[in-house]
Image (cartoon, rainbow, N blue to C red):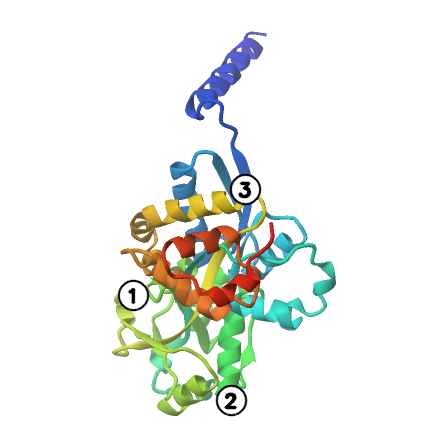
Amino acid sequence: MVKGKFAGIIAMLAIAFSLAAAPAGAAQKDIKWGTGPVGSAGYKALVVLAGVINKALPEYNISVLPTPGAVVTIKGYTVGDYDGDYVSDVALKELNSDTGRFQGFKANIKRPPIQSFWCYTLDVGLAVKATDRTKFKKWEDLTGQPVFTGPLPFDTRKYLEDAMAAVGVKHIYKQVDLETVGSQLDSGTLKGMTIYAAGGETPAPWLSEASLSVDWAALNPSPDEMAKLKAKGFKIEEVDPKIFGAKNTYTKKVVLLPFYWGFDLGPIVTEDEMFKILNAIEAHADELANLDPGFHQIGGGKMAAFEKEALSSTWNLAPIHPGLAKWMKSKGVWDKKWDANVAKM
């Protein structure tokens, strides 16, 4: 009985503190936001983003929900399981064309994804065990070899597979747990693995862990392969290998292929609410970049320019949140041709 009274007092105190912490008369709006699995770049990024938004705008309570991959969040959002998703231009193209991971899925869609906030690029490439770097000198050398390009649901896997196909690599895809990638590359079970970094600067957490198990070297495409990639529309960038760790300096530059990623919200937030959220993100963009360098592409006053750059490539792939449209117009970076694709909410 004493324990019961004590528990009741604790519960009452907890309620009192909760009420005292909330703005007077305000009710929190709960947002269920899907992202990638724990250990992925997307999961880390949304945890950071949600923390900043929750602090800056206490009227929202964002729950970060890990899933096997971003594609799962898109499917879940379209059928009403999530209020927000983690999306790439690669996935939106597949969804539109009813191909790949979305083949046959259109009949299930209750609402389309809504473009709300493009946050960074993920930049993908390949690596081999450091001692194999004289054996594998270009991507095509991996033909016939077991390669881990990422978990099946990952958009980074899809994009890298498309790029490898574009230059004629006929590798053997091997699915392994993220926790074992490094050890399997070290043992020779794998001959190649994917590498990627958010914003060309921040490796995925699982890759940092893999680097503790194996000394790897970036495998850059040859000049001829890069010419093929450019001809097929792939963007190419070169980054300092030091971003991946001190051991990985076997090449002067690491060649990566960037594509766009965003965290989107649907009708759970109105035009004015999305406008307010974007203003909060911009105000804290440098803080976000400090917490997760992957956000550096929107830091330093570059957020408006980045939204314009991304939307220039994606505007016709999915409806655009009216709050994003309002925000971009306020920054003078809106293109009138996008008006036709603003969502009606």
Examine the rendering and report whether any part of residue 150 can be seen.
no
SS class, disc 1: helix
Residue 185 falls left or right of residue 345: left
Residue pointed to by mark 3: 31
The front one of 116 and 291 is: 116
Image point (36%, 55%), residue name: 331
Whole-percent x and y of residue 128? Answer: 40, 77
Q: Is residue 72 above or below residue 155?
A: above
Residue type, numbered disc 3: Ile
Instruction: Name the residue tied to disc 1.
Output: 243
Instruction: Tell me where residue 338 appears, x and y as whole percent.
Output: 50, 65
Query: Does residue 90 show up?
Result: yes
**Residue 274: % across, % down:** 48, 47
Q: Of the two numbered discs 1 and 2 on the same chain, state the one appearing first in sequence.
A: 2
Judged by depth in the image, the label closer to the viewer, 1 or 3, is 3
The label number, if any, that marks residue 168 in the structure image: 2
The Cα–Cα distance between marks 2 and 3, rounded to whole angstroms, is: 43 Å
